[in-house]
Image (cartoon, rainbow, N blue to C red):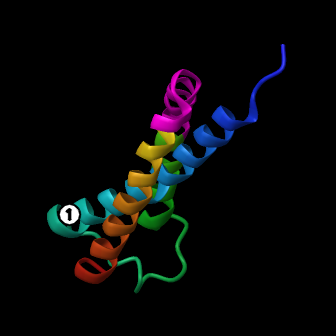
Amino acid sequence: MRRQPAPLLAALLGALLVVPAAYALLRGYDALFSSEANPATVVTSLRIAMYWRLAVGAYVGGMAAPLVYLAARRDLFRTLRGLELGVLLVGALLLAQGTLLP
């Protein structure tokens, strides 16, 4: 059985989009509701919150990849349109997080 590369690439793109979105949401939560140090001021630490946010983002991206794959196998064009909106959403989240909550 030969796999089609398009759904796999869509799943990879979906997983890669989820990582920065999760990071931005977690950073926003930490900035608004938690009293942790600013990651821009903490340079050397193995327990820096930035690494934990990236790890959680990678975990969530890994959970999203099979869902995107299944959606892409069912209707590739519709899934890619959703991922296109996801690119805009992630860009807006990162812009908001970077400017409002540094």
The reply, left or right, for residue 15 in relation to residue 4 is: left
Q: Position of residue 33 (x, y in %)?
A: 15, 62
- Depth order, front residue of 33/18: 18
Q: Position of residue 60 (x, y in %)?
A: 46, 41
Q: Is residue 69 visible?
A: yes
Q: Position of residue 71 (x, y in %)?
A: 50, 27
Q: Residue at x 44, y 45 (%)?
A: 81
Against 17, residue 79 (above or below) is: above
Magenta span of residues: 62-78
The reply, left or right, for residue 11 in relation to residue 31 is: right
Which corner quadrant of the image does residue 73 belong to?
A: top right
Quadrant of the frame with the N terminus: top right
Q: Residue at x 40, y 77 (%)?
A: 39
- Depth order, front residue of 97/36: 97
| Magenta stretch encompasses residue 58 | no
Residue for badge 1 = 34
Badge 1 crowding class, 10 Å Cα cut-off, few under 14, some 14 to 19, many 20 or more, is: few
Q: Is residue 23 visible?
A: no
- Mark 1 secondary-structure assignment: loop
Q: Residue at x 51, y 27 (%)?
A: 75
Q: Position of residue 35 (x, y in %)?
A: 21, 69
Against 28, residue 72 (above or below) is: above
Against 80, residue 19 (above or below) is: below
Q: Residue at x 46, y 60 (%)?
A: 20
The reply, left or right, for residue 6 in relation to residue 30 is: right
| Magenta stretch encompasses residue 64 | yes
Farthest residue toward the top?
Answer: 1
Q: Main secondary structure of the magenta part?
A: helix
| Mark 1: amino acid | Ser
